[in-house]
Amino acid sequence: MAVRNSGTNKACKAKQDTYGMGDIVTAEAMIQACRKRGRIVWAYGRVSTDAQELERQNHVFEGLGIDDEHRFNEKKSGKDFDRPVFRELMEKVEPGDLIVCRSVDRFGRNLIENERLRNEITFGKNVGIAFTDSPLLNRTGDQSTMGYLMSSIMYIFQSFFAETERNSILQRTAEGRRIAMENGVKFGRPSYRIPEKFREIKDDIIDGRISINQAKKQLGINYRTLKKWLRTARKEELSDMLRIRAHGLLDAVQEMDGGSPSLRLAAQQLAAQMTEEAEKLSTEERKKPEFDESGKVKKPKRQKKETDLDLEIERMEKATAEFVRRADEMMEAMYGGSLSVAES
């Protein structure tokens, strides 16, 4: 069989009988050959998220005799090779060294980038790459033309499946997230409850007995958070005010002996509107998420400014005052026997 010329990777070059398996070269054989030449064997392990563990990959590396000093592990997506630990490894390897990786998907999940980086490392840097799970992928400098071809084809196939699997995972995750959010599931940080310490000094802040700077220092928060708490507290007050008036209206309806059916109906409808408005004020309003074509949640165009939020509170105060005025007139009409409010 033809032997590849010296322009191919020489990182783990050895005669075929050194490996003992023809063109199928195990990672163990490549490691042994490199150590005989006095070169360094490195290991690269990767998972995508902090929740995943590298223990199984490190167990394999440990079994191959690769110590901690020469292992490079990171928790980073395999979508590309813009990874800090991988870049650090590339700076350390030298011609003749060997990089051991458990499988192609641990190396990367991008078909084009996988092939480009493999060629750059093996031909450009003259550094070998060995995959412990797939001996067919391992490329050596003395492979036959057929062996080199099979190794390349299998590597491209496995890189393709690795990228396809990643895309499938992203699609399923996005779909599951979309369905969950449409069903009311909330993602992200849990809502933060306003501490009791703030409520104790809230009135003093509003009345000016405690300055904004003093309040920030006492509570250990910044200006934006303080303003948010003040607005939330005001919404709670408006909500309580509406609920009290709504209950008063319903009590008045129950106490009426006979009376105008139209007045009773008008009072019940107003009480329902006030209760609904109170519920909106007491719960954080969350708009239904919008999704793009890929199923990802669209980002909001911009955050509301402080002035917009203050104006929003002013509108709520005016709307609440109007509800309260109508409720007071309605109660006066019911107790006084007038129909003018209900009919107006």
Image (spheres, rainbow, N blue to C red):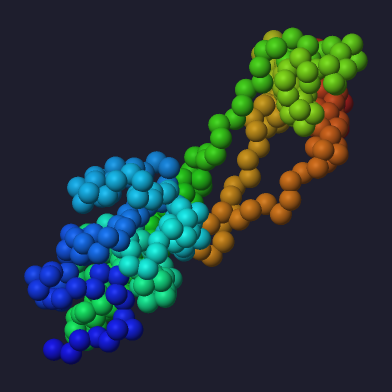
* Occupied quadrant, residue 192: top right
Which percent across, then down, holds residue 213? 85, 21
For residue 330, say whether it is visible.
Answer: no
At x 67%, y 13%, the residue is 196
Which percent across, then down, holds residue 51? 39, 41
Instruction: Identify the image quadrant of the C terminus.
Output: top right
> How many callouts does the rendering have?
0
Which residue is nearer to you in this view: 24 or 297? Answer: 24
For residue 230, say whether it is visible.
Answer: yes
**Whether residue 17 is situated above or below residue 262 in the rendered picture:** below
**Whether residue 185 is situated above or below residue 10 in the rendered picture:** above
At x 13%, y 69%, the residue is 19
Which percent across, then down, holds residue 74? 42, 49
On screen, residue 302 versus residue 67, left or right, reads right
Which residue is nearer to you in this view: 343 or 104? Answer: 104
Which residue is nearer to you in this view: 336 or 138? Answer: 138
Instruction: Identify the image quadrant of the N terminus.
Output: bottom left
* Occupied quadrant, residue 145: bottom left
On screen, residue 21 versus residue 3, left or right, reads left
* Occupied quadrant, residue 3: bottom left
